[in-house]
Amino acid sequence: MNLLRDKAFARLWAASLLAEAAEWMLQVALPVFIFQATGSAASTALTVAAGMLPMVVLSPVTGVLADRWDRRKLLCAVCFGQAVVSLPLLAVGGASQLVLVYLVMMAQSALASLYEPTRSALVPSVRTAMRAPTAPSSPGSLGRLAGGSLGGVTLGFGGLGWTVGCYLTLLVAAGTLLVPRFAAQPVKTPTGHQKMWRAWLAGLADIRRERSLRVAWAVVVPVSIGQGMFVVLFVVFVTRMLGGGEAETGLLRGIQAIGGIAAGLALSSTARRVAPAKLFGWGAIVFGLVAAIIWNAVYVTTSPALYFVLFIVIGAPVVIFNAGLLSVVQLATPPERTGRALSSLFAAGSLCQVLGTLGAGAIAAWVSPAVLLNAQAVFAFVAGVIALTVLRRPVATVEECPAFTPPATST
């Protein structure tokens, strides 16, 4: 069965694609804008950190809401809410108004913290209602390709105003797609009359009980620290070491999706019997190896063609890693608590990204970005070894996971 022929799944898939593209536009454009306005890696790091902290603080709330409220309506509200809170960016004209950027990033992050756990928790119920065994490649990779590239191009040729205009258009379109009601298998949630903090603690209890969830947390910590370092140092790496600008920054971030799309297709058709733990571990190990090549190749050559190829390649292990991670979490938690488990995991990742971002921003003026970025490669490699070593007994195969779909990527 082609899932995209089903109106319910097609609307959710298309809305996720537009929302991901919009999100990636700002993820690429705003750090570049800040770095150009200030010339400071520390200021860029603060911007990125401002966009992550709300995810950490609000995780007890967002996970419970994703399990308690109508997930379709919640996604729709998030899209329209993000469009509204981004409007102050239209008034930003230079470094003197960067406080608006920080405030918008925090508001955007607060709303985005609802989106991913809600979407990930909704997909299994939609697919189960359709009795569908497999899903097409995640819209996250396509959204990354379109949004990452579009964010750099619009900022370079039209400024922040054009970027915000495209962002608003994509988000409103995504929200509109979610307005028509579509069928999903109802999830029984015993938390309707339960206090929110008790519902959140019940979700954390799953993590304490399940070994696979504890390992997922242990692996997410080093990967997320490295990711936090990457987000701020990538802009410095491209502009100072490769001599690129906005367009090159957006293009290199976006073209990773090409490898991600290829990996997603492979996972949907030929790798369905692979244990999630193996996807989880080997994805991280291969990512670490390719990342090490990227960051050290600069000492040999800065040829754009080489980096285009390498960034395409590195998109594949990112999707494989995230697919394994999401499958492990979905297999280990009951449907009524999936949202809480995912939001807690995302919160832990966001906190570690903040630590990595602020640490990298603080020392970037004294240490070469290539040297610091090598730490990201080491963290990912170590995380993969942990996953393969501890999760030797496969929890289940990807084929046995009814919720499996390659998730959105963030690298």
Image: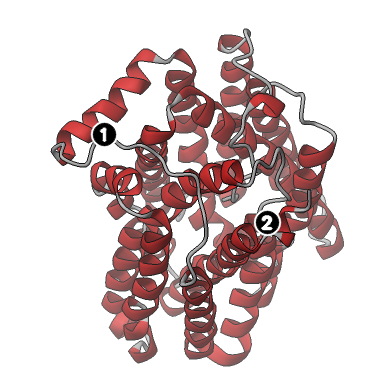
Q: Nearer the viewer, residue 410 or 141?
A: 141
Location of residue 300 with respect to 178 vertically, above or below? above
Q: Nearer the viewer, residue 347 or 193?
A: 193
Q: Residue at x 42, y 70 (%)?
A: 79
Q: Which residue is mark 2?
A: 141
Using the numbered discs, state the Cα–Cα distance from disc 2 to disc 1 in whole angstroms. 34 Å
Question: Helix, strand or loop at disc 1?
Answer: loop
| Colour option used | secondary structure
Q: Which is nearer the N-term, disc 2 or disc 1?
A: 2
Location of residue 31 with respect to 162 vertically, above or below? above
Q: Which residue is mark 1?
A: 190
Q: Nearer the viewer, mark 2 or mark 1?
A: 1
Location of residue 222 with respect to 185 vertically, above or below? above
Q: Is residue 317 left or right of residue 205?
A: right
Q: Residue at x 64, y 62 (%)?
A: 144
Q: Residue at x 59, y 60 (%)?
A: 8
Q: Is residue 66 left or right of residue 267?
A: left
Q: Residue furthest top?
A: 393
**Snapshot quadrant of residue 308:** bottom right
Q: Amino acid at mark 1?
A: Pro
